[in-house]
Amino acid sequence: MQYPLPIARLIDSFMKLPGIGEKTATRLAFYAMDMPKEDVDEFAQALVDVKEKLRQCSVCGNITEQDPCAICSNPVRDRSTIMVVEEAKDVMAFENMGEYDGLYHVLHGVLSPMDGIGPEQINIKSLIVRLQKNDAAKEVILALNSTPEGESTAMYISRLIKPAGLKVTRLAAGLAVGSDIEYANLITLKRAVQGRTEL
């Protein structure tokens, strides 16, 4: 049996979201159909607002309603450190942690030659320009995911900016709290040993 066109279109729309298959999309579509109209209107407006009201900060590439973003325009932030992250959601994760008070730079992806993503497709060039203009920057923290693409992107950026005399660091990585050493892979163990700290 075919669904009425409005439901079919809604199912197709939900399936465009990552991790949403046909069954989940169908469940969401029927749930939306039973929602009060005010809630549906609010949900639809939230989707429209995300596309119409948000933009990338011209300084760091983070998502923002104002330009420059609240982080870049905050005079209290430590301008000597710039943390490079893959996506804007990574900025939110570090901000929620509450331990980092420096600036950010959002790449909006990582290098992935297999997918046709080179340095021109992500926000690397603006990072280099930004570092050339920012005399206050002393350290660049490469906070990229520990994937092959994240690692290669970190190495690429490091090679570009190290000649400028900036300190380039990576996040410590290693064993997660509560994990067993015997189940850790070799890269994780290596990072754990290299990133050890004094007690």
Image (spheres, rainbow, N blue to C red):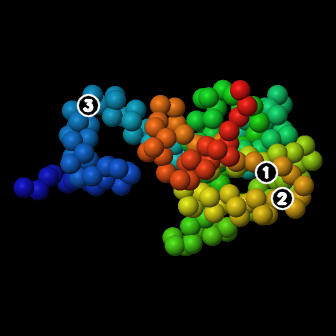
Element under disc 3: loop
Q: Is the residue 153 above or below the residue 89 in the image?
A: below
Q: Residues within 10 Å of mark 3 (few under 14, many from 20)?
A: few
Name which quarter of the figure residue 80 lies in.
top right
Element under disc 1: strand
- Residue at image x 26%, y 41%? 28
Q: Amino acid at mark 3?
A: Met
| Image location (x, y in percent) of residue 130 | 82, 53
Cα distance between the residues tagged 2 and 1: 7 Å
Q: Which mark is residue 162?
A: 2
Q: Amino acid at mark 1?
A: Val
The extreme right residue here reads 135
- Residue 26 visible in the displayed image: yes
The extreme front residue here reads 182
**Pointer 2 or 3: first along the chain:** 3
Q: Is residue 58 left or right of residue 88?
A: right
Q: Of residues 177 and 49, which is closer to you in this image? A: 177
Report the residue marked by disc 3.
Answer: 35
- Residue at image x 77%, y 36%? 102
- Residue at image x 70%, y 61%? 155
Q: Which mark is residue 168?
A: 1
* Mark 2 vs 3: CB contact within 8 A: no
Cα distance between the residues tagged 3 and 1: 50 Å
| Image location (x, y in percent) of residue 174 | 58, 43
Q: Of residues 102 and 185, which is closer to you in this image? A: 185
Q: Is the residue 80 above or below the residue 100 in the image?
A: below
- Residue 88 visible in the displayed image: no
Q: Is residue 62 left or right of residue 182?
A: right
